[in-house]
Image (spheres, rainbow, N blue to C red):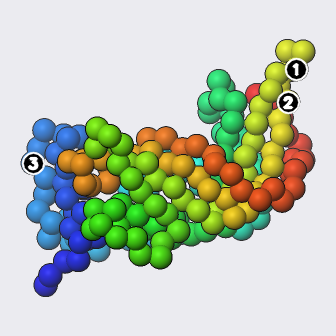
Amino acid sequence: MALNPLHLLLLQGAATRQARGSGAPAAPASTTAASAASTPTSKEPIVANQFEFLDKHFDPTDIPEVAAQTAYERFGNYPNARVSTVIFGIGWTVLTDSIKHAVLNYVNGGVYGNSAYATLDMDRNQWNIVLTGLQFVNATRTVVRGRSEYQIDEYNNGSIFVKAEAIGGQLLGDVVHLDTGFGTWVQEIKLKNSASF
């Protein structure tokens, strides 16, 4: 059975990460596929290592207030952060697949009606990826008279900028950074019972 280029990239990326993470050789693709097929599924999405960072900026909800609460709570885990962005209103698989396809489109030399676009930096060791048409909330924290104050805004039809490792100048590695771009402002979200960190 022939594999399409997306499957080949995924298998090669998994083998590279596995070999990098442990001194042991990577398992054959057939073993990896068989073990993945036998793994029971759950309601929570399984986060591949390459998207572990992105998962911290994602909430599977369609409700802006829930995404806003997630963005607010992230400040507790990152006390020095000034901005917290959470993407919502899109499926995890749709989001990650758009990133994978953007990289494939670039490698194959074409742009195929995708909501994400990728380019390589000059050193060919980092992907710069633009995700478009997203809903997100952006929480900002400022300190006024020694006390933290928060503002959370909802946006739609927004763009997010993602940086990821480029393995061999062609494969998608780990997502390492996310920046909020721009979008259509919808509303400021006020949280109920928000405690100070």
Residue furthest to the bottom in view is 1
Percent from the top left, x then y, of residue 156? 73, 62
Give the percent coordinates (x, y) of residue 21: 23, 40
Mark 1 burial class by Cα count in 10 Å: few <14, some 14-19, many 20+: few
Q: Nearer the viewer, mark 3 or mark 2?
A: 2
Q: Secondary structure at mark 1?
A: strand
Q: CA distance from mark 2 to mark 1?
A: 7 Å
Sequence-wise, the earlier of marks 3 and 2 is: 3
Choose between 27 and 164: the one closer to the eye.
164
Give the residue at x 19% y 77%.
3
Question: Which quadrant, please, contains the C terminus?
Answer: top right
Residue annotated with mark 3:
25
Q: Residues within 10 Å of mark 2 (few under 14, many from 20)?
A: few
Q: Residues within 10 Å of mark 3 (few under 14, many from 20)?
A: few
Q: Quadrant of the N terminus?
A: bottom left
SS type, badge 3: loop
Q: Amino acid at mark 1?
A: Val
User: Is 67 left or right of 110, judged from the image as shown?
Assistant: right
Amino acid type for the residue under numbered disc 2? Glu
Gap between marks 1 and 3, in whole Å? Answer: 53 Å
- The residue located at (54%, 44%) in the rendering is 178
Q: Nearer the viewer, mark 1 or mark 3?
A: 1
Position of 124 relative to 103 (above/below):
above
Q: Is residue 10 visible?
A: no
Q: Nearer the viewer, residue 164 or 80?
A: 164
Marks 2/1 in contact by CB < 8 Å: the verdict is yes
Residue 144 numbered tag: 1
Residue 49 falls left or right of residue 136 = left
